[in-house]
Amino acid sequence: MQKLWDKGYDINEEIARFTIGRDRELDLLLARHDVLGSMAHITMLESIGLLTKDELNTLLAELQNIYREAESGQFVIEEGVEDVHSQVELLLTRRLGDVGKKIHSGRSRNDQVLVDLKLWTREQIRLVAEDVRVLFGELQQQSERYKSVLMPGYTHLQVAMPSSFGLWFGAYAESFVDDLVMLQAAYRITNRNPLGSAAGYGSSFPLNRKMTTELLGFDSMDYNVVYAQMGRGKTERNVAFALAGIAGTLSKLAFDACLFNSQNFGFVRLPKECTTGSSIMPHKKNPDVFELTRAKCNKIQALPQQIMLIMNNLPSGYFRDLQILKEVFLPAFQELRDCLQMAAYIIRKMEVNERILDDPRYDLMFSVEEVNRLATKGMPFRDAYKKVGMDIEVGRFQPCKEVCHTHEGSIGNLCTSDITALMHQVWDGFGFERAVGAEKRLLSR
């Protein structure tokens, strides 16, 4: 097996298989970002005299070829090769000769893994944020479309007060804005450069870490080299908390939708292609997509705890325990993105029952409206409350289903444009264009 640390002796293959685990499989996700990190690193090496200009140009050209192979799905980690870093270096050496061996100067596999994970994670954060923004847009459109359609609001799962589909859709839209605030904080922690920290104690080479920070489009570097290594696991944990927040909102939305779609509620109708039937009951249309979304999102909400337990009681420095983080962390992004995309599709096609209030079981939700109407006419609120309560007890209550709510965020004043403006403000705060632009410039060198 090809190993960067090879010392000329063989190890037990069972031990090798145990220690490598799923690294080779998961490292394929990091291949493009490993190439980007190498391109920035060797550009810096040339600037400090460890590579000639011709060597740099030769290496950059071949790394661009490898990047395109990774982008098109042609990049593989060959049998007997330990990880993505070994594979990239092997390809360079095989195609270019000894110059390919020079790319590791001033680096450790530790900071290679760190920079790969940071570059990959910031891209995944951007993709998740984009999916959240699409779902946000669908929710806002439905909020405006159904803003005048009333529905029961619940407390303790008891019919409580008038709500509306405008409020229901809009509530989830605004919740996702707050979730993106948390994701932005995670992005800030992610988007710092660990390259040059080597094994966690720096290098005797005169590395220019500011240069690689600029080349890779990081906001800043992880300055202290020991802290750069300590950031492994901490970054994943903080990002996981942000993903868990999004998953929590989405899980609650899925639960509501499943409940409201059931025959006992009949508030909404899900697109039929997102439901399945029963093998024995011909009438069934089960909300499987949202049920699976709920389960997947609940699993994602456990991710921060998994990461914390893997990291528990680790002192400073690198430990192999951290390798296991990849197995729980990397797959979570695509799982969450799948759920967000499914939710956006369903929300866009969801149909709302506009005749809910024809059912007399919802009459009592207008009791507070009647209390407020009497109080507006001069009756003390507590007296009005008692009067309406007595009317309900003796069966005299007659609901007035005209609702007039005007304050900000209420049925008649959804503040849709304000929530949208808040989303724009949060989105602009990410500054994704800096990272995307830097990567494009690096690939065009």
Image (cartoon, helix red, strand yellow):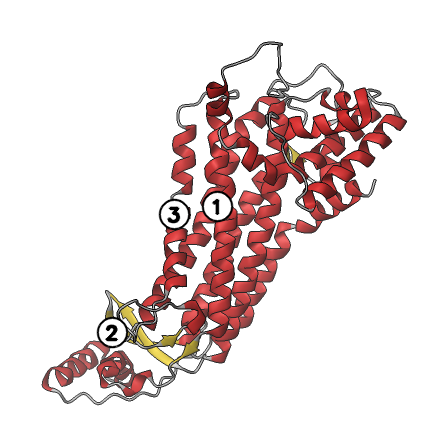
Residue 285, above or below 121 = below
Residue at mark 1? 332
Q: Quadrant of residue 423?
A: bottom right
Q: Residue at x 77, y 21 (%)?
A: 102
Q: Which badge, 3 or 2, is on the more N-terminal residue?
A: 2
Residue 159: give its label.
Answer: 2
Left or right of residue 333, residue 375 in this image: left
The foreground one among 136 and 175 is 136
Q: Residue at x 43, y 83 (%)?
A: 148
* Contact, mark 1 vs mark 2 (Cβ under 8 Å): no
Residue 299: give its label.
Answer: 3
Which is more foreground, mark 1 or mark 2? 1
Res. 386 in view: yes
Which is more foreground, mark 3 or mark 2? 3
Q: Amino acid at mark 2?
A: Val
Quarter of the picture containing the C terminus is top right
Q: CA distance from mark 3 to mark 1?
A: 9 Å
* Contact, mark 3 vs mark 2 (Cβ under 8 Å): no
Res. 178 in view: no
Q: What x and y, as percent, mark residue 146?
A: 45, 79
Q: Residues within 10 Å of mark 2 (few under 14, many from 20)?
A: some
Q: CA distance from mark 3 to mark 2?
A: 30 Å
